[in-house]
Image: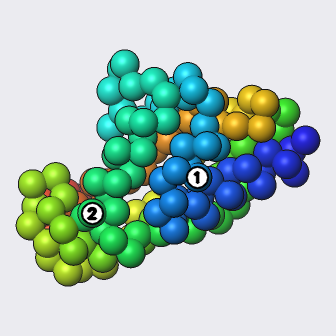
């Protein structure tokens, strides 16, 4: 089961990287819940996440998530990874800089019936904003 669950998450990342939004949506349960600083409290189902993914790809058309370590136990799959992309569109009010960013992050997915039912995600977009020079580095 853990091997199958890992493959579901790998397929999700692969389809998201290829911007296959319909296939991404098929991998989520109808009541999918995302726990993420950018998610709204009432965001249920795959549609809000798909829309956020589209906006991300508009800003970073070549963005990709690269999975590093991945572990699974029972119905949970967790990985650490890196998102890379080139800033070619407006992002959070910032005009394109054409800079490439690298954002570290972690995600854990709960699998139910062969689909992703719930996600807990933390991606360091603060680091991305610093790389775009939209905010300055903190003083040490």
Which label's residue is closer to the chain start, 2 or 1?
A: 1
The reply to whether discs 2 and 1 touch (Cβ–Cβ < 8 Å) is: no
Q: Is residue 6 left or right of residue 14?
A: right
Instruction: Give the total number of marks visible in the rendering.
Output: 2
Query: Which residue is more in the foreground, 43 or 69?
Result: 43
The location of residue 63, given as percent across then percent down, is 40, 69
| Residue at image coords 23%, 79% | 99
Q: Is residue 34 left or right of residue 138?
A: right
The location of residue 2, given as percent across then percent down, is 86, 44
Q: Which mark is residue 58?
A: 2
The location of residue 13, given as percent across then percent down, is 59, 58
Q: Which mark is residue 23?
A: 1
Marks 2 and 1 sit apart, C-alpha to C-alpha, by 18 Å
Q: Residues within 10 Å of mark 2 (few under 14, many from 20)?
A: some
| Residue at image coords 16%, 52% | 92
Q: Would residue 14 be visible to someone looking at this image?
A: yes
Screen quadrant of the C terminus: bottom left
Extreme top residue here?
42
Q: Residues within 10 Å of mark 1 (few under 14, many from 20)?
A: some
Tell me if residue 4 comes above or below residue 10 in the rendering: above
Residue 1 picture quarter = top right
Q: Would residue 71 be visible to someone looking at this image?
A: no
Tell me if residue 66 comes above or below residue 119 in the rendering: below
Tell me if residue 83 comes above or below residue 12 in the rendering: below
């Amino acid at each position: 089961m853990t091997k199958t669950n890992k493959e579901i998450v790998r397929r999700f990342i692969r389809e998201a990287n290829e911007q296959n939004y319909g296939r991404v949506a098929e991998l989520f349960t109808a009541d999918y819940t995302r726990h993420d600083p950018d998610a709204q409290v009432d965001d249920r189902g795959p549609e809000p996440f798909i829309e956020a993914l589209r906006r991300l790809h508009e800003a970073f058309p070549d963005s990709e998530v690269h999975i590093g370590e991945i572990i699974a136990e029972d119905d949970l799959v967790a990985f650490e990874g890196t998102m890379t992309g080139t800033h070619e569109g407006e992002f959070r009010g910032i005009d394109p800089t054409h800079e490439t960013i690298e954002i570290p992050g972690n995600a854990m997915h709960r699998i139910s019936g062969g689909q992703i039912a719930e996600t807990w995600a933390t991606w360091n977009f603060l680091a991305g904003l610093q790389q775009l020079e939209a905010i300055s580095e903190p003083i040490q």
